[in-house]
Image (cartoon, rainbow, N blue to C red):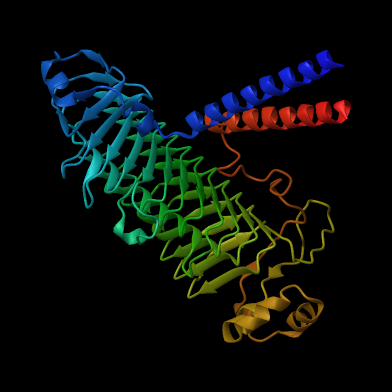
Amino acid sequence: MRSKHRMNVLIFVVLIHFILVSLLFTVVAFSATEEEVSSKQIFDLQQIVDEAQPGDTLVLAEGNYLGPVVINKVLHIQGSNQVLLTNDSPEAAIMIQAEGVVVEGFNIRQNYVNESAAIVVTADEVGLKDLNIQTKGYGILLRDADRGTVLHNSISWLRTKNIKTGEKGNGIDLYNSHNNTIEQNKIQNMRDGIYLENSRQLKILNNQLMGSRYGIHCMYIDGSEIIGNLGEYNITGAMIMGVRDVLVSNNSFLKQSKNVNAQGILLYSVQNSVIEQNIVEGNRVGIYIESSQENQIRENSILRNFIGIQFVHAESNKIHDNDFVSNVIEAEATDSDANEIEQNYWDSAQGLDLNKDGISEIPYAINPFYQELISKTPAFQLFFQSTGMTFLSSMYTNNQESWTKDSSPLMKMSIDSISKPPPSSTEKGNISETTFMLLITSTLLITSVAIIFYSGVSKS
């Protein structure tokens, strides 16, 4: 009997020890990178750069480094997660002035408040990779810098959350910088996630943009491609202005709805561009088009927005093969003529397909009754898609010749938008190390408690 009691005590002690060790690992996992490197040696990065020869590869030892640093020779600077560069001065933490420089793989903290930036690039063919940037100003600025690569960086706002969005800096900011690739970056809580101006032939690929004013904000970027990006909880997902020959494809802009001017995609003064295969879901306006001509709006999934698509002074655009599903107001047009709207799917359309080609022989005229009603009395939004509202809409025929029409609506959705929802920021990518450690610790804790409880029950 006594040996059994000793065994239970031993098991209890071992389990308590196991729990304490697990909790210790959890505390370590939740410690910030800056705290992990705070006890290591402090280095002067400018001195290290000055002593290097052009063409050298500098592998930074673990520890803290002080900025600012100016790089005016070709170098490859490589760090690790245990390297932290801190800058408290108004200059950029890193100023790159030499062509062909590569900086990758460490943490940067820009502490100076105002228009300062973590990194400023004024040279061509520069590579910035795998950097974790926290800033009280801007993240990365490119000025007159061509053919560069900004790849797989994390940029986030460092100051208090109560500051106004307009007082922050942009995550990645380009001016007069052509043929650059910005890919697989994660940008959170900045003024604009990616800001592009007067820069041609850019590739903006597979970035995550959250909690900013504009996820992507671009002006005068002719011939550029914006592909595969995810924007969530911004005021506007993508604001595209003053461009020609731009491709906006396979992006997901979700949940831009907290502001009265929120849009998934906003096109202003855009010509001869293609907007295709995007998902705009849960926004106040899915796609907003103003003063834009000769564009192709095709194969997009426009889902659960307050207004699906809105035209203002927009002419001669082609809108086809899009899916409009569960939008409160499907389409709205003001002073917009000669737009070709055909072969879209509208979930509220009553079609008739006599020749079984998947296209209705009956055009679909978008009834503006509900739109006009709620513009006068917003409280009527509560009756959206109610039986009474549907009946009243069916009786409304005022000025029917001016209604927006789809000349040949589709009978079925052209894209499998509902069964394959876009991945959100919480779903994309692999599980983080911190989350993994938390899951392991929680599992061990629950298992330990269960064993202790079982041992106590057996003893009694």
Front-most of residues 41 and 245: 41
Q: Is residue 448 left or right of residue 230?
A: right
Q: Is residue 378 above or below residue 76?
A: below
Q: In the image, residue 361 lies at what x, y percent?
A: 77, 63
| Quarter in which the C terminus is drawn | top right
Q: In the image, residue 245 lies at what x, y percent?
A: 40, 47
Q: In the image, residue 395 lies at what x, y percent?
A: 76, 84
Q: Is residue 357 left or right of residue 156?
A: right
Front-most of residues 418 and 193: 193
Front-most of residues 383 and 241: 383
Q: In the image, residue 257 lies at what x, y percent?
A: 54, 63
| Quarter in which the N terminus is drawn | top right
- Looking at the rendered structure, the number of numbered marks drawn on it comes to 0
Taking the view exactly as shown, the residue that stands out farthest to the front is: 2
- Residue 95 occupies quadrant: top left
- Residue 212 occupies quadrant: bottom left
Q: Is residue 251 above or below residue 167?
A: above
Q: Residue at x 42, y 37 (%)?
A: 185
- Residue 282 occupies quadrant: bottom right
Front-most of residues 258 and 401: 258
Tell me if I can see residue 100 in this picture: no
Q: Residue at x 58, y 46 (%)?
A: 277
